[in-house]
Image (tube, grey):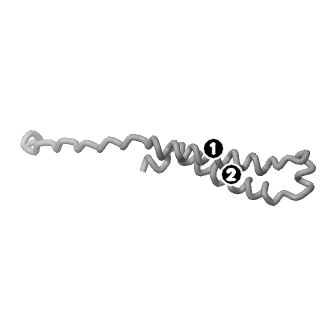
Amino acid sequence: MARLFDVRRVIGGLFVLYGVIVTLIGIFDGPSELEKAQGVRINLWMGLGMLAFGLLMLLWLRLNPPPPLPEPQAEPEPDEDRAA
């Protein structure tokens, strides 16, 4: 369960999600948005950068996974003879 919440997975997943959204916005930018950015498709470039960063984080997680958690050791049961 602890592996599910590795910070690389959370950060990578969010950057991939936001990267896809911003890239799509950048692809469909209209002339007014391009004029505001002086002809640079800033949403497209930033979306691709975010997408690349998120994929690198997920690749890092894949290549270097967290170590497995140690198994909990069973506590020795108290002797009933000593308790009496």
The residues tagged by marks 2 and 1 sit, at their Cα atoms, a distance apart of: 9 Å
What crowding class fits label 1: few (fewer than 14 Cα within 10 Å), some (14-19), or many (20 or more)? some
Q: Amino acid at mark 1?
A: Phe
Tally of numbered tags: 2
Q: Nearer the viewer, residue 83 or 18?
A: 18
Q: Amino acid at mark 2?
A: Gly
Q: Nearer the viewer, residue 41 or 36?
A: 41
Residue 69 position by quadrant: top left
Residue drawn 36% across and 43% down? 68
Please provide percent x and percent y for residue 58. Answer: 54, 47
Residue 21 position by quadrant: bottom right
Please provide percent x and percent y for residue 79. Answer: 11, 42
**Residue assigned mark 2:** 19
Q: Nearer the viewer, residue 81 or 28?
A: 28
Helix, strand or loop at mark 2: helix
Q: Give the quarter of the figure containing the C terminus.
A: top left
Residue drawn 15% across and 42% down? 78
Checking the image for residue 53, the label placed there is 1
Image side of residue 76 versus residue 12, left or right: left
Residue drawn 68% across and 51% down? 19
- First in sequence, mark 2 or 1: give its number: 2
Image side of residue 72 versus residue 45, left or right: left
Image side of residue 68 versus residue 64, left or right: left
Looking at the image, which residue sits at the far front? 39
Please provide percent x and percent y for residue 75. Answer: 22, 42
Helix, strand or loop at mark 1: helix
Please provide percent x and percent y for residue 14. Answer: 62, 50
Residue drawn 43% across and 47% down? 2
* CB within 8 Å, label 2 to label 1: yes
What crowding class fits label 2: few (fewer than 14 Cα within 10 Å), some (14-19), or many (20 or more)? many
